[in-house]
Image (spheres, rainbow, N blue to C red):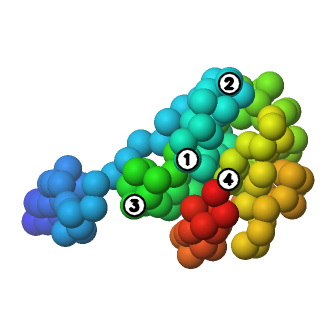
């Protein structure tokens, strides 16, 4: 009987802890990534700022892990860079347009010159999206460097 009470007490404590909210003490606001459904939406965004594109899917564990990292950057730079998410399961045509085969797949379009996208690639611009891709889970540091490069090269 005593073991049952102890187990029930521990179980109740575990349930209370799991349902009690916690905070990291951060005052940073989180930003939701915009979802785009067409190339025209991306073009409209490019008129006034670079566009950071994250391609992924909810079924992808690395994509789920990547999302909070990109959300942090979006909260930090949302006034100067558009951050968008494209669900490759729902937007096959956009995934095909950008030749996405592995996810998460991220890149930044700094600008469009006469309809030609200029992607950020290691501190320079390229018209080759493949060269500008950051594929797989990528830590915040390299992503932030690319964002700063996009702002500088815009």
State which tag comes first along the sequence, 2 or 1. Answer: 2
Q: Secondary structure at mark 4?
A: strand
Q: Dividing the image into 4 quarters, which one contains the N terminus?
A: bottom left
Mark whose residue sits in front, 2 or 1: 1
Q: Dividing the image into 4 quarters, which one contains the C terminus?
A: bottom right
Residue beneath disc 1: 49
Residue 42 as seen in the image, left or right of residue 83: right
Residue beneath disc 3: 76
Residue 129 as seen in the image, left or right of residue 152: right
Q: Quadrant of residue 144?
A: bottom right
State which tag comes first along the sequence, 3 or 1. Answer: 1
Mark 4 → mark 2, Cα distance in angstroms? 16 Å
Question: What residue lies at 60% left-to-right and 30% top-to-bottom?
Answer: 44
Q: Are marks 4 and 2 in contact (CB under 8 Å)?
A: no
Residue beneath disc 2: 40
Mark 1 → mark 4, Cα distance in angstroms? 7 Å
- Is residue 139 at least partly visible in the picture? no
1, 77: nearer the viewer? 77
Mark 2 → mark 3, Cα distance in angstroms? 25 Å
72, 151: nearer the viewer? 151
Residue beneath disc 4: 110
């Amino acid at each position: 009987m005593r073991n049952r009470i102890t187990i029930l007490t521990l179980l109740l404590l575990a349930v209370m802890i799991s349902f009690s909210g916690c905070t990291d003490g951060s005052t940073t606001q989180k930003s939701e990534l915009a979802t785009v459904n067409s190339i025209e939406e991306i073009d409209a965004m490019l008129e006034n700022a670079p566009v950071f594109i994250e391609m992924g899917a909810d079924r992808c564990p690395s994509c789920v892990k990547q999302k909070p990292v990109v959300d942090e950057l979006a909260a930090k730079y949302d006034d100067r860079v558009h951050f968008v998410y494209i669900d490759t399961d729902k937007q096959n045509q956009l995934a095909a347009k950008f030749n996405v085969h592995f996810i998460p797949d991220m890149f930044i379009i700094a600008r469009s010159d006469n309809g030609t996208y200029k992607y950020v690639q290691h501190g320079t611009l390229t018209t080759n999206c493949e060269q500008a891709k950051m594929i797989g889970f990528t830590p915040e540091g390299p992503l932030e460097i690319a964002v700063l490069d996009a702002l500088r090269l815009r």
